[in-house]
Structure formats: structure tokens, C-alpha cells
Amino acid sequence: RKTPIVRASQPFFLYMICIGAIIMGSAIIPISIDDGIASIEECSLACMFSPWLMSYGFVISFSALFSKTWRINQIFHHPKFRRVTITVKDVIVPFLILLSLNTIVLICWTAISPLKWERFHMGATDDFGRRLQSYGMCTLNSKKDFAYVVLLSIVNLAVLLLANIQAYQARTI
């Protein structure tokens, strides 16, 4: 932590990227839960927990990268090119805004029409009429519920576009 390269990389942001990647990667765990180890209600809760983990992991990792790029642009594109002090507090604002937008959409989705877990049986049966094959998955309650997925995507893709603009501005530094 005390080497010059790590200090120059701003450990706070490196920690944020690592934590966000771990949270985003852990989103696969709730998806692996099925009715063989949990009740249908618990499976449905796990279904809805996965988008929360994905969104929060993305927000944490992405906002750290965005803030670092924004910070570089603020320092090198300052009109008088004099010393500019930008604290962690100054760059936490994009994180809080993106986290708030994602949280609002996720709360609405969870409260109004959460994902539910369903088991689907395939056509094959044995000699006694029992189904031989089935699969379970998280499903939307209706096609209208896809709007939450679209809204989350729009919010995060808009911020990704802003980050690309920031990266384009920083390309010559």
C-alpha cells in the first residue's frame, strides 16, 4: 500500500473496483438456488436478490472508474493548469447519484412486481405418467415487467456513455 505506484493509483478507488467485482460476481449465487434446496418463496427471493447484487456491484466498480477518469480530466483540463485539489468526497457524488437511481428502480421493481421462480415440466414421462424432465428459472410476472430491466439498462448505459465521453476527453493526457 505504501509503494509509489499503489499510492498514485489511489487505493480507495482500487478497493471500490475490487469490492464491486466481488459483489457483481456473487450475483450468480442466488441464481443457483432451486426448489431442491429451498422453498418456492425462498427461490423467488433469491431471484430478486440477483439483480440487486449485479446493479450494486456494477455501480461500485463503475463509479470508481468514472470518478478516476473525471478526476484526471479535472486536473489536466483546468484552464490555468495550476494545482487543483480534488478529494475523495468530491468524486463520490457520481457514485451516490448512480446508486440512488439504481436503488429507486430496484425498490420499485421489488415492491411492485418482483421476479418469481417457476418450474417448467418438459413433455417426457415414464411408464407411470411421471414427468422425467423439468427445469426451473426466474421469470417476470408479465411482459410489462420487462420495463424495469429496460429502465435499469437505460440508466446504466447513459452513465456508460458519459464515461466514454470522459475517457475520450482524457485520451491525449
Image: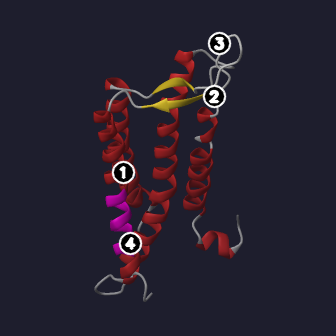
x and y percentages locating residue 134 in the rendered image: 62, 26
Q: Position of residue 57 (x, y in %)?
A: 52, 48
Q: Nearer the viewer, mark 2 or mark 4?
A: 2
Amino acid type at circle 1 is Ser
Question: Residue at the location (65% across, 20% down)?
Answer: 125
Judged by depth in the image, the label closer to the viewer, 1 or 3, is 3
The nearer-to-camera label among 2 and 3 is: 3
User: Local crowd at mark 2 within 10 Å, few (<14), some, or many (≥20)?
Assistant: many
Residue 153's label in the rendered image is: 1
Task: Please state if 35 lies on the left or on the right of 146 as rendered.
Answer: right
Residue of label 2? 33
Q: How is the image coloured?
A: secondary structure
Image quarter in which the N terminus is found: bottom right
Query: Viewer-proximal residue, 27 or 104?
Result: 27
Q: Which residue is mark 4?
A: 164
Q: Which residues are magenta?
A: 157-166
Q: Residues within 10 Å of mark 1 (few under 14, many from 20)?
A: some
